[in-house]
Image (tube, rainbow, N blue to C red):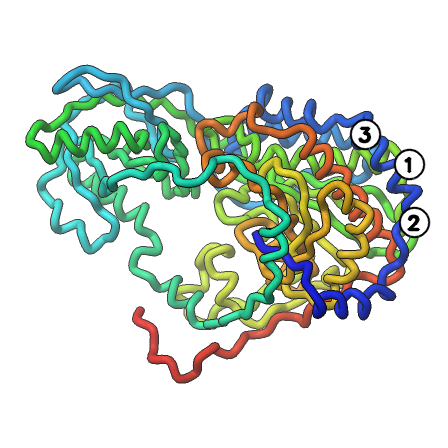
Amino acid sequence: MFRLVATVSSAVILLAGAAQAQPVDRVALNGIIDQGFNHSQVMPTAAYLTDRIGGRLTNSPQMRQAEQWTQQQFRDWGLSNVRAEGFAFGRGWSIVRSSARMTAPRPIDLRAIPIAWTPSTNGVVSGEVILAPITSAGQFDQWRGKLAGKIVMVTAPNAGSEPTEPFFRRWTDEELRGRQSYSLPTPDPAAAERQLRSPNADFASRLDAFLAEEGAVAWVRMSNRDGGLLHGTGYLYQVGQTPRVAGMELAAEDYRRLARLSVGGTAPVLELLSEVRFHDEDVNAYNVLADIPGTDRSGEYVMAGAHLDSWVASDGAVDNAAGSAVVMEAARILKAIGARPKRSIRFALWNAEEQGLLGSLDYVDRHLATRAPLEDPALANLPNNRSWRARWPVQPREGHADLVAYFNIDNGSGKIRGINAEGNVAAAPILQAWLEPFASMGVGTVSLRPSGGTDHVYMQSVGIPGFQFIQDPLDYSSRLHHTSIDSYDHLRADDLRQAAVVLAGLLLSAANSDEPLPRMPLPTRPNVTDPFAPPAAN
């Protein structure tokens, strides 16, 4: 994540914009701080989502339980208009049990997990492995006629890696100061459409069809992290696109052992068991929404969100029960202190973030703005999230102006150190003023650089002031993100209490400000950065 505090230039920005922000209500902040630190419920909330419910794959039984439980919590805390807003998704999927074992040349249990939305093995299956790295459809002919009855190893093994930096760390003051420069955009408006036409755009489906036609018993891939970590991520969740061949992910160390044996002339034999279930009772996924009504500013609202869904290799603790619990705790705190904001405050727990920010995209498309369809009929019916960035112009909906600020939290359980202002130089000094009361808690950086990969992205893409918090990294990216050890044990209680207090305070300041946060211009199709560059290859 990137930050801005800055030297002389940022001081000028702060002075120029400070007058736009209403003074922070520090008496209300006293109440927020007392409630958030002395009466916190953020850890019991996180524990219920993780230890009690567990991994919350979209449309799985666990996610359905999380949707119901979070709504009830919001109601119990006194929030208004608590609801689940559905959108088309696809099949649910859950793991019953699984195992992997090498039986020759010697017996050994392997660390493995079924790949999401792949089918069961229909009991224990056995077969020799064949190392057949396949990364594109153009490689199919190389392996045609060689895979029948085999368990296909589709990843090219690497040499592995040893850590050269600590797994767990916090941002230093020097690192925060060093992230001050503006990130110059380099638009290539044709890139999104080129990606849509890529021959590998639907590679996962084509690989499954090829393996099924060739008579493969199953396929396995290598984990992309060492240390025995597993992920199990997969994306063929749509109705009518369910794979035919069972897939499993093996720990990188186990996978490399099999590869060495295979290349050395001793083809290992594996036994695999993958028992999974598909859930088709309801193909809609649901965002959970709840409000604290405003007393003034009719129709305007500020919003905080985090994604509730996760993968299922573990319990989805830092990604993103942590953020969900912080959003819920901020709602509880504000109700507990009797806050009566001028603008309404809306809290969102998004669904299907892990499959492409689908829940937040549905909210944007339904309530805020849409984009014109692609003119090419071959591309016009692609899923919304695949074609969104390639479609112009942006077409605001009636509610576009009502959402005056959106704050997202999705970087694990580290304390908040600041916020990404996403290039909005007019909003940066106001955000700085709102965060100033929390300076003694380690908060103070406002970065103009953009951040991506989570649920504020589509807000930004239609001109909504949407921001992602800067958090201490801890061990989020090094070993927890999407992995088999993402459990409650790695949550940091003091950090999450601080994050909930900061979020509640920022929401209240945004809701009570005399003027809404300044907006960037409504995005329009940009010019290419280098008009004289040679055409990119398709």
Q: Is residue 162 above or below residue 402?
A: above
**Which mark is first along the chain, 2 or 3?**
3
Given the image, on which type of amino acid does mark 3 rest? Answer: Trp
Q: Residue at x 53, y 51 (%)?
A: 453
Q: Residue at x 90, y 45 (%)?
A: 26
Contact, mark 3 vs mark 2 (Cβ under 8 Å): no
Q: Is residue 453 above or below residue 255?
A: below
Quadrant location of the C terminus in the rendered image: bottom left
Given the image, on which type of amino acid does mark 1 rest? Answer: Gly
Contact, mark 2 vs mark 1 (Cβ under 8 Å): no
Q: Nearer the viewer, mark 1 or mark 3?
A: 1
Task: Check disc 2 and report the residue beneath it.
Answer: 295
The answer to which image quadrant residue 99 occupies is: top left
Task: Check disc 3 and report the residue beneath it.
Answer: 77
Q: Residues within 10 Å of mark 1 (few under 14, many from 20)?
A: few
Task: Check disc 1 and report the residue beneath it.
Answer: 338
* Residue 8 x, y percent position in the rendering: 71, 68
Mark 3: which secondary structure? loop
> On residue 150, which mark appears?
none
C-alpha separation, residue under disc 2 versus residue under disc 1: 13 Å
Q: Nearer the viewer, mark 2 or mark 1?
A: 1
Q: Is residue 365 visible?
A: no
The answer to which image quadrant residue 518 occupies is: bottom right
C-alpha separation, residue under disc 3 versus residue under disc 2: 19 Å
Q: Residue at x 37, y 80 (%)?
A: 533
* Residue 330 x, y percent position in the rendering: 76, 37
**Which mark is first along the chain, 1 or 2?**
2
Given the image, on which type of amino acid does mark 2 rest? Answer: Thr
